[in-house]
Image: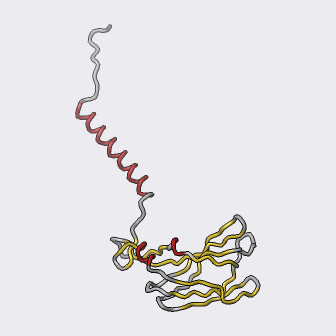
Amino acid sequence: MRKGVKKRGLSPVVASVLLIFLVLVLASLIFLWARGFISEQVEKFGNPIEEACESVVFDAGIADRIGGQITLEVVNRGDVNIHHLDIKMVSGGNSEIGQFDFSVDAGEAFSDAVYLRMENGDTPEEVVVYPALIGTIKGKHSNNPFTCNDQGKTLIL
């Protein structure tokens, strides 16, 4: 062994600073990763919007059918305004999601002719209509639509 060679390590202060920095970086990464799993809470009437979905009562039906065009009739029997309707078209094993951009206020009815065609050109065998409400994002002054997936009505074409 050589004489006069001194082995030195990190000082305790530098080691502590490096450990704290490493912990902060890991905590930031975990927070950013987990933030994708936590959605913003949407409220309606000061309560979570899921509770407002339970108050949605509506009927959807086909009033008329001419070729590939149907007349969709929606009656809102509840006391919550429906902002728009999301639809799920099903044909065989395939399904597609779409949207009807019309609103139905509480206690009112709406009827409109719509053309239902899937991207591959097929006519859907059934359509599931879901009401979508508009709510306020908690802690912010912006609105966000929320689809009530438990309130869907299935229409057989």
x and y percentages locating residue 76 in the rendered image: 51, 87
Apparent side of residue 10 relative to residue 38 in the rendered image (left or right)? left
Q: Is residue 78 above or below residue 27?
A: below
Apparent side of residue 16 relative to residue 92 in the rendered image (left or right)? left
In depth, the one of 79 and 31 nearer the eye is 79
Q: How many marks?
A: 0
x and y percentages locating residue 96 in the rendered image: 65, 69
Q: Quadrant of the C terminus?
A: bottom right
* Residue at the (66%, 89%) spot, across then down: 63
In depth, the one of 79 and 22 nearer the eye is 79
x and y percentages locating residue 108 in the rendered image: 51, 92
In depth, the one of 19 and 156 nearer the eye is 156
Q: Residue pushed farthest left? A: 13
* Residue at the (24%, 29%) spot, across then down: 11
Quarter-wise, where is residue 102 in the image? bottom right
Identify the colour scheme used. Answer: secondary structure
Apparent side of residue 84 relative to residue 89 in the rendered image (left or right)? left
Quarter-wise, where is residue 94 in the image? bottom right
Apparent side of residue 113 relative to residue 13 in the rendered image (left or right)? right
Q: Residue pushed farthest bottom? A: 108
* Residue at the (45%, 78%) spot, across then down: 134
Q: Is residue 11 above or below residue 27?
A: above
x and y percentages locating residue 71 in the rendered image: 66, 88
* Residue at the (62%, 89%) spot, across then down: 112
Q: Quadrant of the N terminus?
A: top left
